[in-house]
């Protein structure tokens, strides 16, 4: 990832809280092991660096991402910039039963309200423990200080 803005996924997720990204960056499988059962195969797979949605072949892109393809085709950085927001593709993703996906619509609305830099600052605060350790979507206790994490999925 080349810039702070690369932490904004096309769908509105904050890449800085991605369990796969943090597992690789922190060399700590606890981030992926805490994920829901649907990710069972990925929990022991080799950890890989992720270039984010703007890079080629992000780690989360096992199947071609319709959201990413649509935004790229429209020349958009994220779906919050689209005149058709929220569309049926994004709404289906937000309601697919995966807990962190449910945050996308609210995240994109907030992005539209406050702008990218302010949203990123909010997300960095939300996903950082009071001890300074970065948090991921499903890891309930801080890997550094072991405190429970508030406002978590």
Image (tube, rainbow, N blue to C red):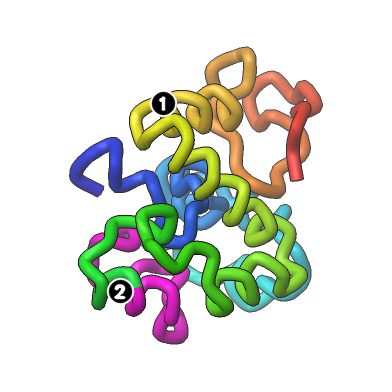
Inspect this view and state whether residue 49 appears: no
Magenta region includes residue 69 = yes
In the shown orientation, is residue 148 left or right of residue 104? Answer: right
Query: Tag 1, which secondary structure?
Result: helix
Residue with the mark numbered 1: 118
Q: Which mark is residue 89?
A: none
**Quadrant of residue 141 in the image?**
top right
Of the two numbered discs 1 and 2 on the same chain, state the one appearing first in sequence: 2
Residue 29 at x, y percent in the picture: 58, 52
Kindly report the distance in space between the C-alpha atoms of the residues bearing marks 1 and 2. Answer: 28 Å
User: How would you classify the magenta stretch by its main secondary structure?
Assistant: loop
Residue with the mark numbered 2: 57
Span shown in magenta? 51-70
Q: Residue furthest top?
A: 131
Q: In terms of depth relative to the viewer, which is nearer, 108 or 113?
A: 113
Q: In terms of depth relative to the viewer, which is nearer, 107 or 121?
A: 107
């Amino acid at each position: 990832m080349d810039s702070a803005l690369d932490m904004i996924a096309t769908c509105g997720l904050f890449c800085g809280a991605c369990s796969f990204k943090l597992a690789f960056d922190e060399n700590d499988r606890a981030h992926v092991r805490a994920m829901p059962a649907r990710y069972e195969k990925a929990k022991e797979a080799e950890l890989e660096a992720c270039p984010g949605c703007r890079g080629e072949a992000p780690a989360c892109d096992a199947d071609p991402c319709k959201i990413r393809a649509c935004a790229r085709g429209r020349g958009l950085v994220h779906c919050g910039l689209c005149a058709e927001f929220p569309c049926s593709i994004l709404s289906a993703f937000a309601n697919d039963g995966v807990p962190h996906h449910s945050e996308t619509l609210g995240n994109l609305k907030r992005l539209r309200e406050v702008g990218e830099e302010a949203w990123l600052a909010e997300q960095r605060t939300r996903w950082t423990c009071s001890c300074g350790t970065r948090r991921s979507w499903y890891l309930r206790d801080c890997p550094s200080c072991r405190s429970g994490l508030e406002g978590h999925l």
